[in-house]
Image: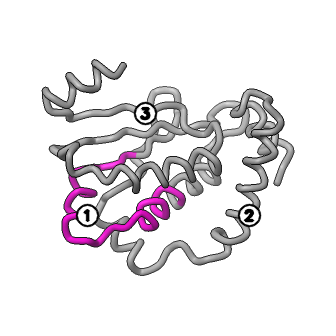
Amino acid sequence: MTDGEILRYSVGRHFKMDAVISDLKYHLLWRQTTVPVPRLTEHVVKLLNRGLMYIHGRCFDNTPIMVVDFGRIGEALNKNELSAGDYCQLNNILARYMQNNMMVPGQVDKFISLVDINKFSLKAMPVTMFKECAHELSLNYVDYNAGQVIVNLTWMQNIVVKMLQ
């Protein structure tokens, strides 16, 4: 682990050292158990090829964009082809790829998530699956996500989102 990564954890946790130490311990344990395991299994490659998540170039300030297509995720969920572990693995693969290959030190050090709801019913959303993955990503990719943009909401979903903001 580099000094830069430790600094990123410190900044991401607002220099609350108890939280930084706890997150670093979790991350190092996660790295020992997850990273050596081959992530690109045949099943995950099949999911990537279906376009559930993909990298779609860069925005105007050269920040990489990761697109999450909920329409395709919904199809995979309906066919029982996607589990919480698969969803987290897809996120990890793309986040790690962007971290290792698309960041420019001192200039571009974060990525943007573009979430395409694509007629996905909020009632069908497996909240625990997304919660698990969000927790894992927040601990292992601290301060890498510059923001999230949600597109293609139905008018009712848009109203709910505006009320929550």
Magenta region includes residue 90? yes
Q: CA distance from mark 2 to mark 1?
A: 29 Å
Instruction: Give left or right: position of 67 versus 163.
Output: right
Which percent across, then down, holds residue 20? 78, 41
Quadrant into which the C terminus falls: top left
Q: Residue at x 84, y 50 (%)?
A: 2
Magenta region includes residue 156? no
Q: Earlier in the sequence, mark 1 or mark 3?
A: 1
Quadrant into which the N terminus falls: bottom right
The residue pinned by badge 1 equals: 77
Q: Is residue 30 above or below residue 151?
A: below
Q: Nearer the viewer, mark 3 or mark 2?
A: 2
**Counting other residues with Cα less than 10 Å from the Cα at mark 3, is it few (<14), some (14-19), or many (20 or more)?**
some
Amino acid type shown at disc 1: Leu
Q: CA distance from mark 3 to mark 2?
A: 28 Å
Extent of the magenta region: 67-92
Q: Earlier in the sequence, mark 2 or mark 1?
A: 2
Which percent across, then down, holds residue 31? 70, 64
Instruction: Give left or right: position of 95 versus 87.
Output: right
The residue pinned by badge 2 equals: 29
Q: Are marks 2 and 1 in contact (CB under 8 Å)?
A: no
Predominant SS of the magenta segment? helix
Which percent across, then down, holds residue 49? 33, 67
Residue 148: mark: 3
Q: Residue at x 77, y 45 (%)?
A: 5
